Amino acid sequence: MAGTRTSSHMIAQRYVSAIFDLTEGKDKTLGAFDRFFAALESLLADKEGLAEAFANPTVSRKTKAEVARDIAAVLKAGKEEANFLELLARNNRLEILPAIIADFRERYAAYKGEVVLEITTAHPADKAALASIQGAVEKETGKTTVLKTHEDPALLGGIVIKFGSTLLDCSVEGRLARMEQSLKQQIANA
């Protein structure tokens, strides 16, 4: 499974690189892709089963391309964004859209001199705490941050903070995993 995630991430990076190569120096086009990806991400979150249909190998590429065209029309996508979505469908890569969107966001933020700050909590986060963390990260990096928050009940409690290549896992789930690993190492060394 980890190999699949890594492979998907590498493929996503290639598609995002292509977007940046083709739109070099065209801030307006990159902004249009950013808005399109935000709308697409919302659509994927709202429409249950859409992401699963994209990943389903029994759904033909032709059907996926038709769905991609329909989605582009519903989202009022520009020509470049619509063509990109249809290209993903033809290449049978719609299932990696979340990875493409995440990679694009990170690269676009860096392009604009910003850093994406992702904060994941088990329960809704306190706005004052989020603002405090955001301020600390901006002070540390010297860059403006783009805050993205997520809720993941599997964390059980605590918080996971990611910005750039930095990952701070202060979640209960993360602590338990580290504790388990430590115990396994102690047993193996005993």
Image (cartoon, helix red, strand yellow):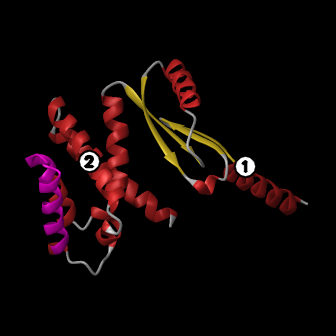
> What span is in magenta?
63-82
Snapshot quadrant of residue 106: top left
Please tell me which residue is depicted at 80% across the width and 61% down the height of the picture: 184
Residue 56 seen: yes
How far from the left and from the top, in percent, is residue 24? 17, 33
Residue 39 got which mark? 2
Q: Is residue 119 left or right of residue 112?
A: right
Snapshot quadrant of residue 46: bottom left
Please tell me which residue is depicted at 36% across the width and 56% down the height of the picture: 45
Tag 2: amino acid? Ala
Among the two numbered marks 2 and 1 on one chain, the one whose residue lies closer to the N terminus:
2
Taking depth in this image into account, of 123 and 109 the one nearest to the observer is: 123
Q: Is residue 64 magenta?
A: yes
Taking depth in this image into account, of 49 and 65 the one nearest to the observer is: 49
Snapshot quadrant of residue 120: top right
Could you tell me which secondary element the residue under label 2 belongs to? Answer: helix
